[in-house]
Amino acid sequence: MSKSVKLAVAAAVGLAFVGQAMAKDLTVISFGGANKDAQTKAFYGPFKKASGINVVGGEYNGEMAKVKAMVDTKSVSWDVLEVESPELARGCDEGLFEKLDYTKIGNKADFVPGAAQQCGVGIFVWSTALAYNADKLKTAPTSWKDFWDVKKFPGKRGLRKGAKYTLEIALMADGVAPKDVYKVLATPAGVDRAFKKLDQLKPNIQWWEAGAQPPQYLASGDVVMSSAYNGRIATAQKDGKNLKVVWNGGMYDFDSWAIPKGSPNKDAAYKFIAFASKPENQKVYSQNIAYGPSNKLAVPMIDKKVMAELPTAPQNMKDAVKVDVNFWADYGESLEQRFNAWASK
Amino acid sequence: MMASSAPMPDHQLTTQDGVPLKTKLARAERMNKMKSLALVLPLALFLLLTFIVPIGSLLFRSVDNPEVVASLPHTIKAISSWDGKSLPPEPVYRAFAADLVKAHEDQTLGDLGKRLNMEVAGYRSLLGKTARALPFDPAPASYKDALVKLDERWGDPAYWQAIRRNSTNHTPFYLLAALDHRIDEVGEVAKATPDQAIYLDVFARTFWMSAIVTVICLLLAYPLAYLLANLPTRKSNLLMIMVLLPFWTSVLVRVAAWIVLLQSGGLINSALMALGITDHPLQLVFNRTGVYIAMVHILMPFMILPIYSVMKGISPTYLRAAVSLGSHPFGAFWKVYFPQTVAGVGAGGLLVFILSIGYYITPALLGSPNDQMVSYFVAFYTNTTINWGMATALGGLLLAATLVLYMVYSWLVGASRLRLG
């Protein structure tokens, strides 16, 4: 009897230890898909080897509602989170993320300008650009103007269902220079102009919502051209699909690491972010998915051929627009509402 | 209690211990009632805690307006004496500067900016910019001049009216916005501008699409239920399994299957083209048609089952009697059989309609932007913009509309005649 009690106690203690070990796992949440696969290769696996901390990778679709619910109820189970810039800025204002201590991460000056923010560190630079299926189109489109030309390029076009990126694209198609896009869009006349331009293309648009959809639509021939995240297109290219990217008029921005406020694993989270910001690890990441490194020191390590397909390559940056986070923080709500009203008519 | 002093009237019955029987009986009944109440209590508590309280507290968010009151207490006190027309007086500016410094320290600027940005686009960054420049050092003679110099928007009454409109803990803002209305600069209820108006259309569309789905379901389900109720047991059991099998499959799986079947290179289009019915693929998905097809398919069992259960209870002798008395078979069906199935039809119709107006995933995956129903926007505000006031306002209105419909229905048909099987 007493022996079995002892055994049970031992088992319980053992379980408790296992439980503790499980609790030490670091939960890293990303946007999933090809992006997560590259992160697993470049960051999660090597980090476990280097530090002994196991990384549990989760994914989400960028909904801040979950983060807010966790922070509000003080039951934060996500330790490190990949976020886009507008959410990072807003979440930082609203107290959803920890303010970062850069002494634990690395040298601020090593980062590409704009990557080191108060609440987040840039992971990589991505771009939303025009992509097309070279098997279906005989002549290659060269700009957003061609995207609107349904006579020369008959067929459906994919655009992201939302005002962000779509309005910028419409203005560029209407002849606004990439550098002036946000200046024009900040005026009521500019917004009208963008929607008027979208009216022209509306019957030919097939909307997408998840980043994985455009390469799928392009490959199946549902659309002939689409706005798409360049990394997803590069991954489809690796799978043997003849998809091409037009860099002219692309829009680039950072995805960043952030730590939700009240994370119980803050120390490990810092270690992970510092590890993922190291140039040698960023190099591995960029070789697995065509997103540009946020650490300047990683640039010379990357193969020239790979470099040419990154949004950060100088020739790709030339006619590109940096997504204006402050603009979208201010006008996002009213423009998204107007976009919804427009799209549902 | 014990009536010992006065002699007992003859007609009053008492128990052995002299207590009037009536009292004793009432006591026993009360005990029984308490016992049954005690038995129901856990369920009632459970419902209250997991259903009514959460829904109530969520609905409360649609009128809750704490941000401005909490972050700008002194400004609100000062602004109450302002007439709301020209620019507010100096004390308002001074109080505002002091409140903003405090809010910046407490990190409540984000919520405040988010709330005011809903009123006037651009307010968020204006607050951020102003808070970073504060406190003024040395304190200026006129805070008004200093703030207007910092950003000329502080010289525009619209920005101050936004604060004044939100100087109470409750606001009709979200509910009005969910009905395409707003409170304009002079404080009157006005229609939203046409390019921002969307929800009245969405509500109308939600009810219209649900009505269509209900009617199609009814037309298809009624004959099938009749067949099920009148076939020999073995055959009807087999048929029943075929009805129930998709009912037990995940909705998501069925929706994905419909995409595969209906897309332009899908099974149905290739079959139609191979048969020579069309020469180009029909657009069957990512539009209203696809949504209707999938919703009818998913909701069909909810129509079939109540009608079937009612039909099962109807004796075939009534119909035979009517025909033998000389009625035309169709007349007999319409006058004798159909009225007996109304309860099932009503229940099925109500069930399908109420389920359809809350549909989210099917239109989201199979429809275009102009096939989205109210739930889509509830999800949009909950997940994407975290505007829970707006989400609950839309959800609350949908709930209210459902309740009104149910009341109209029970007034027309009588809720006691509903039979869910």
Image (cartoon, coloured by chain):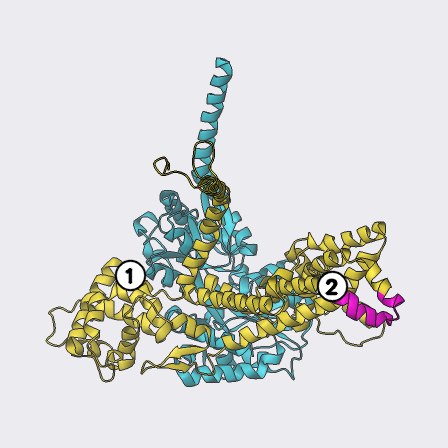
Chain colours: A cyan, B yellow
In the rendered structure, does residue B339 fall within the stretch colored magenta?
yes
Where residue B340 is drawn, which disc sits there?
A: 2
Separation (CA) of disc 1 from disc 2: 63 Å
Tell me residue A271's x, y (percent). 38, 45
Q: Amino acid at mark 1?
A: Thr
Name the foreground residue: B162 vs A301: B162
Q: Amino acid at mark 2?
A: Gln
Where residue A124 is drawn, which disc sits there?
A: none
Would residue A150 appear left or right of B158 to someone viewing this image?
A: right
Label 2 SS: helix
Q: Quadrant of the C terminus of chain B?
A: bottom right
The crowding category of the residue bearing disc 2, from other C-alpha atoms within 10 Å (few below 14, some 14 to 19, many at least 20), is some
The crowding category of the residue bearing disc 1, from other C-alpha atoms within 10 Å (few below 14, some 14 to 19, many at least 20), is some
Tag 1 subunit = B
Tell me residue A259's x, y (percent). 38, 51
**Quadrant housing residue B206:** bottom right
